Image: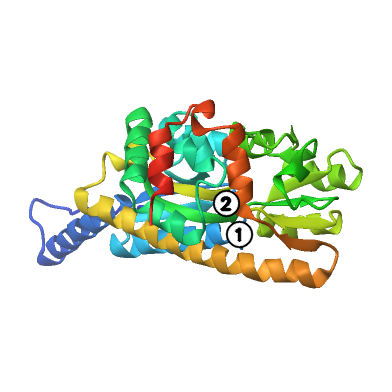
Amino acid sequence: MPTTTTMSATASGSRLSRRTFGLLAGGAVTAAFVRTASAQQVLKFAYVYEPGEPHHKGAVTAAAEIEQRTGGRYKIQLFPSGTLGKESDLNQGLSLGSIDMTISAASFQAQVAKRIGVAYFPFVFRDYDHVMLYAKSDVYGSFVEDYQRATSNRIVALTYAAERQVTSNKPVLTPEDMKGLKIRVPDSAAYMAFPKALGANPTPIALGEVYLALQTGVVDAQENAFNTIWSRKFHEVQKHISLTGHVIDSLNSIVSGLLWNRLSAADKTIFAEAMQKGAQQASQEIRDQDKVLMEEVRKANTSTIHTVDKERFRQAVLAASKPEDFGYQRADYDKIIALK
């Protein structure tokens, strides 16, 4: 935190000597400097991701960029690892003013601005490049505006967060292989569409309990990106990994409306560009890391990795469900699908 030093000067007699006047003048200059220094604003940038993860590294980049480009008028304190609360708490904290910035999954913003949740409908995205097109699209821009109207908070950047794949004890090569499969999913409606549409039995289990649940047969399968499959060692207790890529996760970088609304136009540009720089860095690292970790899993030789016909899975999902079933707008889905 910035510190303030108070200076005082006293003079005896009715007249000030030149030396005393000089000291007082110098004190006035120092006081002005102190007031400027104390005007530095310390901001809290909090998220649930761990140090060493691409999201944290991107946040470090964004924070440094903001501090440098504002001449130190803003000091960004980083709070990784959920030290200031769970992801739901952090989203609420933006509106309460307990934090100033966060990186968060779009599923949380969908709780107050429903339309953005269509990004979780199975197979809405083809690949990394499609997600990057979406981040620059008018339809994403309209989601950002919806969220800002609902909360006053401002989404300023999007981060690619990898494709989710199915791991299982039996091969999942076709949509029919999903039927009756007891599969762990996060406790969020956003992740239910894929298994439900294909007749599986989605079972919410806390992430920290999934390894044991797979090991003991409480569930037969789970779905996650390779960074989670590898770091949580799910490949050790699952015989098969199917490259379904059924959901491509994305995260939003968000500035609290309480902060955003008091920023100058120039500072808004700085904050947005800095957080976009951090998001782009994290997106590229995650994309590259995903390929590396898939090879690490392959080398471990504990699971067989299967390439599947994604289009067949997509058509099976659409035959059984549609975006409207989950409260999404078909027009939004169609606009995302059409991005080229």
Residue found at the very far right of the displayed protein: 216
Distance, label 2 to label 1, CA atoms, is 7 Å
Q: In this rendering, would 7 be left or right of 52?
A: left
Q: Callout 1: few (<14), some (14-19), or many (20+) C-alpha neighbours within 10 Å?
A: few
Q: Is residue 258 visible?
A: no
Instruction: Give the residue at mark 1.
Output: 51
The quadrant in which residue 177 appears is top right
Amino acid, disc 2: Pro
Res 340 label? none
The quadrant in which residue 65 appears is bottom left
Q: Is residue 267 above or below residue 96?
A: below
Amino acid, disc 1: Pro
Where does the image place residue 277, in percent across and percent down from the top left?
A: 39, 62
Where does the image place residue 136, in percent across and percent down from the top left?
A: 34, 53
Along the line of sight, the residue nearer the viewer: 225 or 334 = 334
Q: Callout 2: few (<14), some (14-19), or many (20+) C-alpha neighbours within 10 Å?
A: many
Q: Which residue is at a point 63% across and 41% down the rendered structure image?
A: 316
Q: In this rendering, would 175 be left or right of 219?
A: left
Q: Is residue 70 visible?
A: yes
Disc count in the image? 2
Along the line of sight, the residue nearer the viewer: 246 or 102 = 246
Along the line of sight, the residue nearer the viewer: 275 or 4 = 275
Q: Which residue is at a point 39% across and 56% down the rendered structure image?
A: 133
CB under 8 Å between discs 2 and 1 = yes
Q: Earlier in the sequence, mark 2 or mark 1?
A: 1
Res 80 label? 2
Q: Is residue 180 above or below residue 290?
A: above
Along the line of sight, the residue nearer the viewer: 14 or 92 = 92
Q: Mark 1: which secondary structure? A: loop
Where does the image place residue 315, in percent across and percent down from the top left?
A: 58, 43
Where does the image place residue 281, in percent across and percent down from the top left?
A: 46, 65
Query: How is the rendered protein coloured?
Result: rainbow
